[in-house]
Each structure stands twice: as C-alpha cells, then as structure tokens.
Amino acid sequence: MEKDMVPYQPILSEIKELVLAGRTSAYRAANSAIILTYWNIGKRIVEQEQRGFERAEYGKGLIPALAQELTQEFGKGFSERNLRNCRKFYQYFPDAEVWNACVP
C-alpha cells in the first residue's frame, strides 16, 4: 500500500455498513408495502363478499375465481389459501393503524 493512500480497512468497513444499512432499509420498505397490499386485498374481499353484513351469504365463489385469475397473471402467490389469509388478516386487524403499529 502506498503512503499517500487512505487506510483501506476503515473505509471498507464503512462502505460495508452503508451497504447493509441500505439493504435493511430496502427490505423493510418492501415488507411494509407487501403487508399493506395484502391487507388491502383482504379488505376488498371482505367488502365484496359481505357488503356490510356480519357474514357473507353470497360471494362464495369469489375467492376461487380471484385466485384463478390472479395466479394466471401474477403467479402462485395468489392461491385460494393466500387470499383467505389476506381476508383473515383484514378481519383480525380491520384498523390499518393497529397492524401498522405492529409491523416494525
């Protein structure tokens, strides 16, 4: 190493910390966006199925139909099971502020 060169290890360590901090921030932002998306999917399903009633009398074919269409366009992450989980997520946490406080 030349005498005029900045010591290598301290700058390498700082850059590694910057990369790791940036990745962590990106992961958190992505996770929050995904959770919000799933919550909104659940909300929309509940609103469509129940139309304000406590239990859905109709709309029983909604989730299978949505699963088929969404899986075809976006992949296997939108199975009937996952859509039911989105619905449950919204039903357990109907207030966005409540689940949003739990996410971090």
Image (cartoon, grey):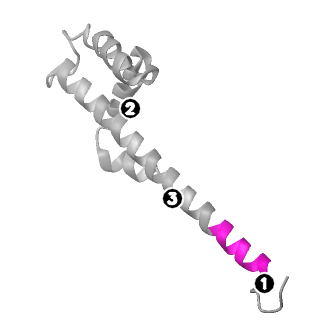
The residue sitting at 45% across, 47% down in the picture is 30
Asked if marks 2 and 1 touch (Cβ < 8 Å), the reply is: no
Magenta segment: 7-17
Residue 68 or residue 89, whichever sits in front = 68
- Residue 100 point in image, percent of width and height: 38, 49
The one nearer the camera, 6 or 78, is 6
The Cα atoms of the two marked residues, 2 and 1, are separated by 51 Å
Q: Is residue 56 visible?
A: yes
| Residue 35, position as x, y percentages in the image | 40, 40
List the residue tagged with mark 2: 89
50 or 18, which is in the foreground?
18
Q: Residue 7 — which label?
A: 1
Q: Secondary structure at mark 3?
A: helix
Q: Residue at 28% across / 10% down in the picture?
A: 65
* Magenta run includes residue 16: yes
Query: What amino acid is labelled 2 in the image?
Result: Phe
